[in-house]
């Protein structure tokens, strides 16, 4: 009798697992990383979160520490933030999740049968888009230019698909301080995008992780605020404005979508403890002041980065200047490959995200994403100086 | 042109959603609920958790509030608790999840193709078992008697299945202070269960939420401590010994299983914040003293419940006396239906879990589960007195 093996019990979907790719590149010692879109950890409002925790545990422990839905106060705080952006939300149109990533990851459960079309931006936030593909979505990439997604190209695509009898399930977009390009879609494109969604009956998923972190320019209305027929699902997070470690994000949209996302969020509601802590902190009114502090910090670091780029990089590297968020996108001249640059830069202790990690369709060797959010100011200048000299060396 | 509807975008699996059944019965005003297996909310260690939060935020905010894996200290605390139970665990054999329910809910992703056989107990914790069925598992129920799962019946079933060429994926069991019966499987049955698992190549999933709450009798070794070939996946939680609101549970087992469960836990690792808080609290050494306090409380309430049952119930209702945990299981005489009793009792403000909500195969109208954990002592006596008079009235 052959010996039984545990591996024989695995379902087909679990037989093979891909080893994680993150980290495997880090065989070099990295002294300056522009790679990750992380908030500045020195700015987390830890004392205020400690005070909020002390308060909720002293006053409401039997509720805060029990099973139950997220704090009612957290719904209220989120709904109030949505209203400030012109988005009407109520308890039935809001889902709270363990980060916006969890909610975005649930979209295929609700919308995607294998082979269904999902429209994404190119470049985009591949961390989420990869999960659409893994769920069997057929991805179609619409280019992003300096004004965000090219909605005219989108219109052509939607029309062509309709002629083939294909109705895409949703369009995933990051219209404000786009990841990875940092660009913001202007109002005229937003209006057209929302109109196209209604015309073609396609959901728009608006990923709005960064819009609170505007350090210049005029506020542009969210897609959700322009939509009055339920064709926009708005998704945001506390990860960039409070701290990612609390793992809290939210979606706001049509209640029939929200209840289905909640159904596939199979472990149940987010923890009462963390939701009460964050709600209490928000309710102190200190969050807006904290965001102002973040904005000043990120603006300073963004400008440092842009100034250093202007000083150190070859003049034919084109850096896009963002009005907020975490990222500067640099278009490389034709003779420089992002992958080659990454290899050379890591030899000198500097890393970043190559554009190839931002496209679902294999493009991107012509650009790189630099995150200025995470590194302290002196490291930013040091890193760009190094990267500049590597760029010049590659030309020799 | 017909108007587009959002509902047309839903995948087949999301088209119809079942309305939640919990709560719809509660049209009566309930004054005493024995229905839910909830920890006593007056006993949550809120002051110590507040102190732990203050400490980790003061000392480690940049880590505690950032993205990242659960606290290393939490792994150490869990591994140390496992070792105290004779279970060898390390970082690669432990998964931390948002409650043990999340981890149990991930089992079908790793193990179940539609039609695969999963073996469950009858009665059992239907909250988890329902999810196995929803994932397409074919459930086979093995009866539970006063010594837990009938492993002789299990052996017959495994043999019959093998003759049909069927290898079940896993056996879900709650061997200690069983939910809903409160019974504990003795050592001789545990040894046989583990031997059967190895003989037939079937995983045993040991749900051990309650074993720390033993208030009498000898400790019985966990199934996982008896297994040396990886056929037991052990699952436990902080929900009963600290607080469910922190949403932290864990599994320990074969690393190939653990890495697959982690892969299907698609929102990523549990939040650093809550994991650091709970780890710090555990590391103070206060948890064991806290558990002793819980045990004294639950023992007192269990004995109050059993005494009241002996006094108030008809003598042919058989209440099983647990050595720990949250539940007393009452077998009703043949002339009394659990459903009829529930309807009558709710008219008088008392509720409980009918046995029908504890079987995957439609049985259970001959028994009820009474949770003594949640209600204060005076409510327990009041509730049992009322329930006793309802039982007597049903006989008139």
Image (cartoon, coloured by chain):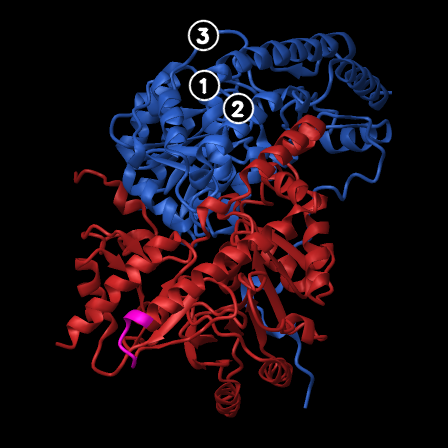
Chain colours: A blue, B red
Q: Are marks 1 and 2 in contact (CB under 8 Å)?
A: yes
Mark 2 vs 3, N-terminal side = 2
Query: Is residue B17 visible from the viewing direction of this image?
Result: no
| Camera-nearest residue between B175 and A5 | B175
Q: Which residue is disc 3 drawn over? A: A218
Residue B17 numbered tag? none
* Quadrant in which the C terminus of chain B is drawn: bottom left
Question: Callout 1: 10 Å neighbours few (<14), some, many (20+)?
Answer: many
Do residues under tags 2 and 3 come within 8 Å of each other at their CB atoms? no
Q: Is residue A245 above or below residue B141?
A: above
Label 2 SS: loop
Q: Residue at x 35, y 53 (%)?
A: B378
Examine the rendered structure and indicate whether residue B136 appears above or below residue B267.
below
* Residue A19 place in picture, x, y as percent: 69, 53
SS assignment at label 3: loop
Secondary structure of the residue carrying tag 1 is: loop
Cα separation, mark 1 vs mark 2, equals: 9 Å
**Spot occupied by residue B276 in the image (x, y as percentages of width and height):** 65, 39
* Nearer the observer, B291 or A341: B291
Q: Chain of mark 2?
A: A
Q: Chain of mark 3?
A: A
The residue under the point 31% across, 56% down is B33
Answer whether residue B313 is magenta in the image.
Answer: yes
Label 1 marks which chain's residue?
A
Height in image: B282 above or below B81?
above
Who's the residue at 38% across and 72% down the image? B329
- State which region is magenta: B311-316
Q: Which residue is mark 1?
A: A185
Q: CA distance from mark 3 to mark 1?
A: 12 Å
Residue B84 visible at all: yes
């Amino acid at each position: 009798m052959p010996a039984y093996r545990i591996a024989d019990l695995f379902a087909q979907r679990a037989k093979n697992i891909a080893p994680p790719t993150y980290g495997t590149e880090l065989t070099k010692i990295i002294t300056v990383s522009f790679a990750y879109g992380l908030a500045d950890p020195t700015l987390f409002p830890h004392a205020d979160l400690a005070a909020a925790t002390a308060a909720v545990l002293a006053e409401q422990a039997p509720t805060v520490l029990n099973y139950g839905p997220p704090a009612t106060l957290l719904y209220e705080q989120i709904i109030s933030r949505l209203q400030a952006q012109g988005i009407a939300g109520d308890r039935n149109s809001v889902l709270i999740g363990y980060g916006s990533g969890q909610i975005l990851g649930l979209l295929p459960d609700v919308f995607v049968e294998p082979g269904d079309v999902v429209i994404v931006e190119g470049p985009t936030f591949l961390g989420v888009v990869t999960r659409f593909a893994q769920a069997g979505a057929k991805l179609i990439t619409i280019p992003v230019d300096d004004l965000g997604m090219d909605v005219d190209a989108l219109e052509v695509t939607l029309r062509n698909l309709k002629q083939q009898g294909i109705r895409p399930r949703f369009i995933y977009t990051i219209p404000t301080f786009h990841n990875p390009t940092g660009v913001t879609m202007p109002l005229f494109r937003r209006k057209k995008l929302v109109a196209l969604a209604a015309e073609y009956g396609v959901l728009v998923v608006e990923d709005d992780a960064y819009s609170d972190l505007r350090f210049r320019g005029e506020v542009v209305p969210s897609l959700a605020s322009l939509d009055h027929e339920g064709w926009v699902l708005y998704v945001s997070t506390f990860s960039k404005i409070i701290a990612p470690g609390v793992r809290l994000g939210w979606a706001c949209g049509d209640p029939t979508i929200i209840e289905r996302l909640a159904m596939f969020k199979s472990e149940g509601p987010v923890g009462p403890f963390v939701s009460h802590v964050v709600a209490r902190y928000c309710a102190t009114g200190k969050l807006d002041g904290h965001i102002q502090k973040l904005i000043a910090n990120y603006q300073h670091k963004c400008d440092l980065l842009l100034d250093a780029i202007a000083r150190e990089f070859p003049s034919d590297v084109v850096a896009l200047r963002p009005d907020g968020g975490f990222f500067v996108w640099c278009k490389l001249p034709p003779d420089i490959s992002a992958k080659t640059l990454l290899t050379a830069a890591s030899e000198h202790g500097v890393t970043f995200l190559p554009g190839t990690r931002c496209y679902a369709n294999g493009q991107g060797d012509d650009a790189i994403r630099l995150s200025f959010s995470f590194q302290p100011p002196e490291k930013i200048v040091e890193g760009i100086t190094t990267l500049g000299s590597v760029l010049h060396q590659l030309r020799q």
